[in-house]
Image (cartoon, rainbow, N blue to C red):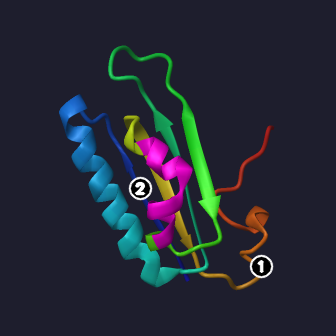
Amino acid sequence: MCAIVGMVGVPNRDEWGETYRLLTALLVAAQVRGRDATGFVAVTQPLKGRFGGAVIMDKAPMASTDFVAQSAGWKRLRAARATIVLGHCRFSTSGSPALNINNHPHFSDN
């Protein structure tokens, strides 16, 4: 059992705060599907123009209620505007969540 939450869209400047609150509520609500680890990846876009965005990612071996309160990446997302957000709550069946390499999202330099 795990949970995946997310959104794809282009919120206006005045809509991002509400969108961020909704994403936080979704991630916390998904905790019932997995309390062992939480993570997310987001693609941001500047409020003016289409270029200069960034990818923000963070993950930690903790429940989502703790993650949204403590994660530097999740706090950084609040000050950005994301066009894509994908979050994950992990229920560990194999591989220790204490080793963050086992937690989602997984990434590669390739």
Residue at 26 percent across and 44 percent down: it is 17
Residue 24: in magenta span: no
Q: Closest to the observer: 68 or 50?
A: 68
Residue 96's label in the rendered image is 1
Q: Position of residue 13 (x, y in %)?
A: 24, 30
In the rendered structure, are the residues bearing label 2 and label 1 in contact, judged by CB atoms less than 8 Å apart? no
Q: Quadrant of the N terminus?
A: bottom right
Q: Which of label 2 and label 1 is nearer to you? A: 1
Residue 72: in magenta span: yes
Query: What residue did someone put label 2 on?
Result: 6
**In the displayed structure, would residue 76 be above or below residue 48?**
below
Residue 54's label in the rendered image is none
Q: Position of residue 32 (x, y in %)?
A: 44, 83
Which segment is the magenta one?
Answer: 66-77
**In the displayed structure, would residue 67 be above or below residue 82?**
below
Tell me where residue 83 sits by quadrant: top left
Residue at 48 percent across and 51 percent down: it is 74
